[in-house]
Image (cartoon, helix red, strand yellow):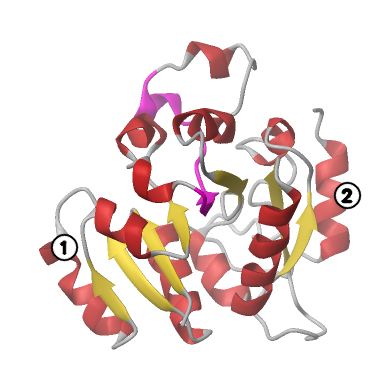
Amino acid sequence: MTTIGLIGSGHIGSTVARLAVDAGYDVVLSNSRGPETLADLVADLGPRARAATPAEAAEAGDYVVVTVPLKAYREVPVAPLAGKVVFDTNNYYPDRDGAFPELDADETTTSELLQRHLPESKVVKAFNNIVYANLAELARPAGAADRSALPIFGDDPDAKKLATDLIDTIGYDVVDGGSLAESRRSQRDTPVYVHPYAVADGNWPPAAKRGSAEDVRAALAAAEV
């Protein structure tokens, strides 16, 4: 049975975990506060879920989702992630993360920073451009007429294929947006960030709407690389 490890179990992490459990995967959740703080979430997710430390989640996962604030990316364990596909969900929020001059100067991307930190891993950018509530609501079976799509970015074609297969299984079509350097097209304040999936109704979280593969491609094309 394929296992998904999660380093970080906040809104996006717990939503991905729930979609994974619903799709038949086992999940190992972790956070910075300790496994005992995840007891309620694990109980809610059921027998396919368990809590662990970040290092244990990294070791247990066949795939691992890193969903921690950018300021904490250097705390992600390196050795147990060697050779694995690692999903990066991060966005840069200076008010939360502090200043990263190389990001402010547009010299690199958050995913490239994580890839440098994990030189033996295969980082794929995903799940960063959609509100957690919309991510939960819009998952659909393969072939559904109202299925939404998520963009991914990565430098390893095989890793992107594996990531595409996993995302398809948990309920979404995939649009390949290019390399990790091109993942800047899905960061905050870009056309594909939140807008394809969220109704502009002034509420938080916003109501969900379908974001088709065509919508996602058009939004990516509208963003400058």
Which three-letter amino acid code belongs to the residue tagged 2?
Ala
Circles 1 and 2: CB atoms closer than 8 Å:
no
Q: Is residue 225 left or right of residue 117?
A: right
Residue at the disc numbered 1: 35
Q: Is residue 203 above or below residue 81?
A: below
Q: Position of residue 96 (x, y in %)?
A: 36, 30
Q: Residue at x 41, y 64 (%)?
A: 61
Closer to the chain start, of discs 1 and 2, is: 1
Q: Is residue 69 above or below residue 102?
A: below
Q: Residue at x 63, y 78 (%)?
A: 169
Which three-letter amino acid code belongs to the residue tagged 1?
Pro
Q: Disc 1 on helix, strand or loop?
A: helix
Q: Is residue 208 left or right of residue 96?
A: right
Give the residues in magenta.
83-98
2 and 144: which one is in front? 2
Q: Position of residue 139 (x, y in %)?
A: 62, 77
Q: Position of residue 105 (x, y in %)?
A: 61, 11
38 and 28: which one is in front? 28
Residue at the disc numbered 2: 218
Instruction: Find out whether residue 97 is within the magenta segment.
Output: yes
